[in-house]
Image (tube, rainbow, N blue to C red):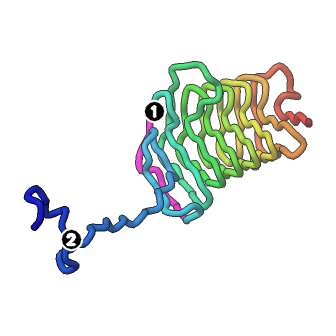
Amino acid sequence: DKKADETYSDKEIPEDEVPEENIPVPSPVENPKISAVKENGIVTHEKTNKGEILSAETASDISSTDQTALWISDTNTKIINNSTLQSEYTFENSKNYSVEVGDNAAFINDGLVLGSHGGVLLYNNAEFINNNIIGNSGDYGVYLSSGSTLNNSGIVENNGQYGVYAEDGSVGTNTLNGIIRNFSNYGMYAEGEKSSIINQGLIENSGFSEETQLSVLKD
């Protein structure tokens, strides 16, 4: 005889009564999206994989406070601006910009880029074609770094030290129709052996001598 206090769990369970284990089926893992474009800090365009082709236009004017109006990133990303992009900063930092373009992306400006500080920052082999107006109140109209390029056929106008600044192997070109106009010392300025500036157009500025219209500083 079995003991009176023996439970069913203590007994041997027949094979045909053994419950099947509920093994959860793993959910498919999705690749995280890659942010390619942000407007006023909000992601507006994403990619599934790096290097995918993305070409788009700004849909409307973008006005920002204390952040970049337009941010563009990744190879084969090309954004065309036909609107007004403007960033107003309430704190002092000369290297805050209305537009930032990086990591092999391309930006074509057919509209207006305005703001209280820098105009356009490019880094990591970014490309910028300006066909209209960059007008800002900071030190840099266009800042090029890490092998980036500028082709200016429009107007770069600012109140600070540099209309166009190139470093780290970057190249800034002011074409025959281009105008670079600022109210301080340097129209175009390149720093480093591999950086260069090319002027075929007009440079106007209010620096302390004509020599500062176009300047190259070698390492």
Q: Which amino acid does label 1 sit on?
A: Ser
The residue singled out by tag 1 in the image is: 64
Q: State how far apart marks 1 and 2 are (Cα).
A: 72 Å
Tell me which corner region of the image, top left, top right, bottom left or bottom right, holds residue 116: top right
Q: Nearer the viewer, residue 95 or 34?
A: 34
Q: Mark on residue 12?
A: 2
Residue 210 screen position, x and y as percent: 86, 27
In which quadrant of the rendered image does the N terminus lie? bottom left
Q: What kind of element bears circle 1? A: strand
Q: Quadrant of residue 218?
A: top right
**Left or right of 180, for residue 62:** left
Q: Is residue 93 magenta?
A: no
Q: In this view, does 111 lie above or below 50?
A: above
| Residue 112: image tag | none
Mark 2 closeness class: few <14, some 14–19, many ≥20 residues within 10 Å: few
Give whichever of 155, 62 is nearer the camera: 62
Residue extending farthest to the bottom is 16
Name above or below for residue 138 compared with residue 3.
above
Highlighted magenta segment, given as a residue range: 53-64
Q: How far across and how far down the image is residue 12, in percent?
A: 21, 71
